[in-house]
Amino acid sequence: MPEPTETTSAAPVRILLVEDHAFTRDGLRATLNLETDLRVTAEARSGEEALERVGESAVDVAIIDIGLPGMDGIQTAAELKRRHPATRIVMLTAHDLREEVLASLASGADAYCLKSASPDLLLLAVRAAAAGSAYLDPQVAHHVLSGVRAPAGKAPLTAREMEVLRLMADGLPNRDIAAALEVSVSTVKLHVQEILVKLKAADRTQAAVKALRVGWLD
């Protein structure tokens, strides 16, 4: 009779929570710790303290509030990435300002989420970052990435692929992209697949973020 095999579950994602407001920090901690695959293992009230915490213990994902006192969240993200490049970063903010989003992505952030978003979207952002993907809050992606364009002579994408990428960034599904461009859905799917391959992106959001990072914006 075969012996029963022992099953082991994956270790939860270790999270550093960087937020200077205790009330907000308590709410975020409670939301995250309700999930079996996520665990807040360290907390900080400032950028300087966050860098100390990461140095003291291993962290998979850092959730960083942009509006930190002293060293702000964008500076904190950039320095954290420099010291610990494997740590994934989720930027959290009350604002959907274009300048903040661009600066956050340039600093090395992997995800950007509004504080007004539902808990489900925050969890989605954290899990996407932990898995190596990119995430932008839909409210941010819609008006920030809609201006994606290809600089002449620099884009690895064709003009048609850039049109598809712009519509992807606007949040349109394949069928709506097909209608807008007056082509078949299967043609759009082929364009999307080609875009992901050329940009070495895991998904549609990551493709848009990569295009943003290399400067294809108005």
Image: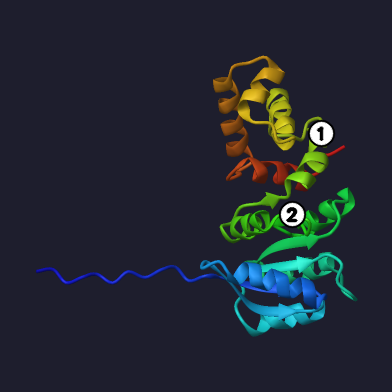
Q: x, y percentage for residue 114?
A: 78, 56
**Which dot, 2 or 1, sits closer to the camera?**
2
Which residue position holds label 2? 117
Task: Give the labeled residue for mark 1.
Answer: 151
Residue at figure coordinates x 78%, y 59% from the top left: 115
Q: Name the residue at 58% across, 38% down.
A: 197
Q: Identify the secondary structure beneath mark 2.
A: loop
Q: Nearer the viewer, residue 85 or 187?
A: 187
Tell me, yes or no, if residue 60 can be seen here.
Answer: no
Where does residue 30 sit, x and y in percent of width and height? 65, 72
Q: Residue at x 79, y 47 (%)?
A: 140
Q: Is residue 131 left or right of residue 205?
A: left
Q: Quadrant of residue 195?
A: top right
Figure quadrant of the C terminus: top right
How crowded is the residue under tag 1: few (<14 C-alpha within 10 Å), some, or many (20+)? few
**Foreground residue among 152 and 109:** 109
Q: Residue, x 41% and y 68% (percent of image)?
A: 9
Identify residue type, mark 1.
Pro
Element at label 1:
loop
